[in-house]
Image (spheres, grey):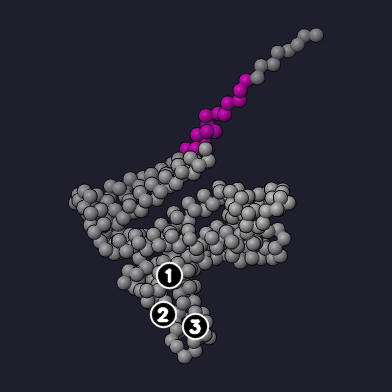
Amino acid sequence: MQQLAIHHRPMRKPVSTFLLLTVPALVIFTAFIIIPVFQSILFSLYKWNGLGPLNKFRGLNNFSILFKDPVFTKAMIHTLMIVIISLAVELPIALGFALIIGDNKFKGAVFFRTVFFLPYVISEVITGILWQFIYHPQYGLVRSIWLFFAPESTSPAVLANPDTVLWAIMGVIIWKYFGLHMTLYIAGIQDIPLELKEAARIDGANPVQVFSNITLPLLKGVLSVSILFSILGSIQIFDTVWAMGKGDPVNSAETMVTYLYKFGLQRFQLGYGSAVAVIIFLICLVFSIVYLKLIVREEK
């Protein structure tokens, strides 16, 4: 009986398929990311109002003026405060609710997941306007609560007070975004095999030990992504802050992005505003590279 020799050739993907899948994405990425970044770097070296040619070269003077401006220094401090509060308050709250709601035995889990995730779906601008009404000192919800506990006093105008406006905005940011991180944590918790937790309980581990030795280590990947999203999002926060007062009064809630918008677009100082954009881009880029390298090193 004659045997037929069958030669298996490795399947090669056509070059046309590769180009069809990659070139459109590469074109879009180049047009909307790469080119604007290099344009911002170029504009930051000039004094330019957005009209006419670039003919007033300033070199690094825009950056020198930027770091000497006390308002930008305040904006950087406020942005750093938002980052710290997001990490120290928002993420722990999200993790705590995820541990409760993520339990399959918890009744009404679907309802509470929807309720807590709903603020994230709402537009940032709508969120800011909504909370302006809630904080309103004459007819807002905060006024009603305040008068319930102290009927003889005057309700505070938290968005008009330089000492309270930033904290009020931070509360809104936590309310809006903690549902996103909670959802991420719930997904990570549900991927943990129940057999591991049951085996630990059989061996005598209490809930705290189960959390610290099983749940938390296995959530490391999700936590890494959540922290990255939280920090980058806090650095670039704009819409909610702008809708709740444009960083005022007296720049007491100014962030780096609201500062960019005011000086770069409203005052038509696009060269100076581009310098701010370059600084924000470099901060995000350096942090992302260092953070991802640390994650890869720990995984090894």
Q: Earlier in the sequence, mark 3 or mark 1?
A: 3
Whether the residues at callouts 3 and 1 have beta carbons within 8 Å, the answer is no
**Magenta span: chief secondary structure:** helix
Query: For mark 3, what is the residue?
Result: 146
- Can residue 235 be seen from the camera position used here? yes
Q: Amino acid at mark 2?
A: Ala
Q: Which mark is residue 167?
A: 1
Q: Which mark is residue 211?
A: none
Q: Earlier in the sequence, mark 1 or mark 2?
A: 2
**Label 3: few (<14), some (14–19) or many (≥20) C-alpha neighbours in 10 Å:** some
Label 1 element class: helix
Query: For mark 2, what is the residue?
Result: 157
Query: Could you tell me which residue is drawn at 48 percent across and 68 percent down?
Result: 172
- Magenta region: 9-24
Q: Amino acid at mark 1?
A: Trp
Query: Could you tell me which residue is drawn at 20 percent across and 51 percent down?
Result: 58
Q: Amino acid at mark 3?
A: Trp
Asked whether 31 or 176 is in front, the reply is: 176
**Label 2: few (<14), some (14–19) or many (≥20) C-alpha neighbours in 10 Å:** some
The N terminus: image quadrant: top right
Instruction: Give the Cα separation between the discs numbered 1 and 2.
Output: 13 Å
Q: Position of residue 253 (x, y in %)?
A: 37, 68
Label 2 element class: loop
